[in-house]
Every structure is written in structure tokens, then in C-alpha cells.
Image (cartoon, helix red, strand yellow):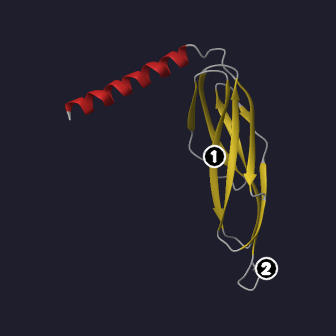
Amino acid sequence: MLKSAFVRKSALAAAAVLAAALTAGASNAAVIATSATVTPAGHAGACPFTFTFTGKIVANSQGIVKYRWIRSDGAIAPVQTLIFRERGAQVVTDTWTLSPPHYVGWEAVRILSPNAMVSNKAVFKLQCLGPNGGPLKP
């Protein structure tokens, strides 16, 4: 039990040191690109249905990136944090389950820091169909 507590404290301390080091050295870090896609782009069938969104965030060096998903209905997801240990790209995901008779919407990735940026809108179309395959009425 004592060893387990020590390991947890050591891991937390190491994470804090890494975060502090990345923050201190990230003065020139920037997100240089972000994009979003949706799978599938359209659905006509049974509802509710879940769309899956994939975002790509590219940083020019090590650092901490804060972002959130935004969407067409005005909902704003909680702020998320990514740690880049070096220059490169990381993938982020989100899902959205809907069940109106029909809906056209989008999600995008909003970068909050170290610099502001918004990805393209990943647009999707939903058409809920009734049990006999016909469209549902609103």
C-alpha cells in the first residue's frame, strides 16, 4: 500500500515537472494547422444515430495546446489539453448523437492556446426514416 502511494506521488510529481518544463519552453510553440472530418458525412435510416468527428492538431514544437469542440447547435464542449513533446500532429475525437427527423450540422476544433485558430467545419446530414423506410415528419 505504501509503495503504491509512493508510485502515484512520483508519477504526479513527474507529470507536474514535465508540464512546467513544457510550459516554460513553449514560448515559441504554436499550432500551425488544424482540421476536422466526420464519419459518416450522411445518414438516412434509423435514429438516434451517432456521428464520429476526428480532428487533427499540428504544433510546430513542444508545448501544451488547449482546445475544444464547437458545433452548429451552439453547444461548446469542455476545454481539453494536449501535451506535445515534440513537433508533430495529434488526433482528437468527439461524437454527437442525434434523433431529430432531419438535421444538417457541423463540428469544428477551436484552438484556444498557445494561439487561436479554428478548423474547417466537418458538415454532416441526418435523415431519420420510419420503420417502413419513409421519412419521419417533424
The answer to whether residue 76 is left or right of residue 13 is right
Front residue of 60/71: it is 60
Residue bearing the label numbered 1? 93
- Let me know if residue 24 appears in the view: yes
Q: Residue at coordinates 37% horizontally, 27% vertically from top-left?
A: 11
Quadrant location of the N terminus in the rendered image: top left
Give the structural element (helix, strand or loop) at label 2: loop
Measured as percent of width and height from the top left, residue 45 is found at 74, 73
- Total labels drawn: 2
Residue 31's place in the image compared with 134, above or below, is: above
Front residue of 110/58: it is 58
Residue 32's place in the image compared with 25, above or below, is: below
Residue bearing the label numbered 2? 135
- Please name which of the two marks, 2 or 1, marks the residue nearer to the observer: 1
Mark 1 crowd level (few <14, some 14–19, many ≥20, 10 Å Cα): some
Q: Earlier in the sequence, mark 2 or mark 1?
A: 1
The furthest residue to the bottom: 132
The answer to whether residue 25 is left or right of residue 54 is left
Task: Name which residue type carries label 2.
Answer: Pro
Measured as percent of width and height from the top left, residue 62 is found at 61, 20
Q: Residue at coordinates 69% horizontally, 46% vertically from top-left?
A: 54
Give the structural element (helix, strand or loop) at label 1: strand
Q: Residue at coordinates 64% horizontally, 57% vertically from top-left?
A: 96
Measured as percent of width and height from the top left, residue 43 is found at 76, 66
Q: Residue 109: which quarter of the image?
A: top right
